[in-house]
Amino acid sequence: MFLLIIRSMKNVISVFSKKDVLFLCGLFVFMSPSCDTQKGSTTLPSEVNDFIATHFPNQTVSEVRETKTMMDYEVVLSDGTEIDFCSLEEWESINFRWNEVPASFLATLPSAMVKHIDEFHTEETIHKIEKKDFGRNDFIYIVKFHKPNDFELSFTKEGALISDDPEGKHLPSLASAFLKKHYPNEVPVSVVEDVDGDFKVMLENNTEISFNRKGVWTELRVYKKSQLPESVLKILPDQMIRYVEKNYEGQHIKRVEKKSYGFRIKLNKPKNVELTFTKNGDFLSVEGRNEEVEE
């Protein structure tokens, strides 16, 4: 009987070519249970397992989901906490639900961010923390709180609060007046206050403006194809503007900084040149630099 089965199998195999046999074998492997989308914690990268063991030592992994790229992981712990890891085995977001945020994890976050939450939101419960990546190691933290207040705060990667007031209402009055006069149709997309009380405002038209704590502008910078408005150019020394127009015809100012001696400006071209002027607009020097201005 056994010999009969062997002979029958040989007859079947002889009908197929080698390519057919390889295809069937591959199909069998593909359909095997090892391709299940749910995996145990032992199949996770060591960095992911170490993160869970460090910050959630009393929890176990109840479910693991892989994304379509099979490089990112969505991990569900036994208490319901959901953690997303990126391909670099770094956490991208953590949904704590109603669970307490581990102190060990808070210690890994920027101290300025944690301090702000402790001082101003002690009565709120954190629902979720995520990192919004902008590329080139540039990202922000977004902290979401539970209802009934149900709101979120954004912080720079250094931990500085990005105002949750998109219209910049908490800016000093001088800064608000400056924006209203020179950028009446632009809305701030972010307002960052640093530890010294200075502000940095990013507008929708790719303009970045820095103000000191009193609301006086200290730096203006435009990105891509944006230019400084005529109203702003008129508050700069006439002599400085005429020098640029005469010696750099067809170019425009991409950055202007207030300095103790006067002003330092950078043009769109040449990209590696900075010009310095006195407070009255008298030319001081031209400096070549390796840093490029973004077009």
Image (cartoon, rainbow, N blue to C red):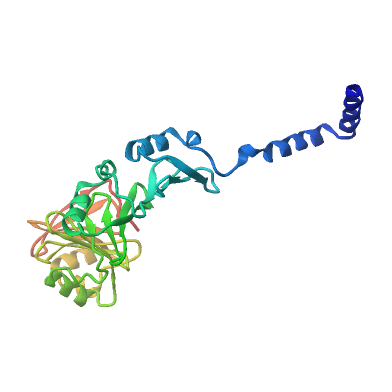
Is residue 44 shown above or below 282?
A: above
87 vs 237, left or right, is right
Residue 257, quarter of picture = bottom left
Q: Name which residue lies at 46% across and 35% down.
A: 45
280 vs 247, left or right, is left
Label count reads 0
Is residue 50 shown above or below 107?
A: above
Image quadrant occupied by the N terminus = top right
Q: Is residue 234 visible?
A: no
Image quadrant occupied by the C terminus = bottom left
Location of residue 64 in the rendering, given as x and y in whole percent from the top left corner: 49, 44
Location of residue 281 in the rendering, given as x and y in whole percent from the top left corner: 11, 64
Q: Name which residue lies at 27% across and 57% down.
A: 125
Q: As rendered, which of 41 and 204 lies closer to the eye?
A: 41
Is residue 161 shown above or below 177?
A: above
Residue 284, quarter of picture = bottom left
Q: Name which residue lies at 90% across and 22% down.
A: 3
Location of residue 289 in the rendering, given as x and y in whole percent from the top left corner: 24, 47
46 vs 270, left or right, is right
Location of residue 276 in the rendering, given as x and y in whole percent from the top left corner: 15, 56
Q: As rendered, which of 26 and 240 lies closer to the eye?
A: 26
Residue closest to the far top? 3
Q: Is residue 146 visible?
A: yes
Q: As rendered, which of 133 and 290 lies closer to the eye?
A: 133
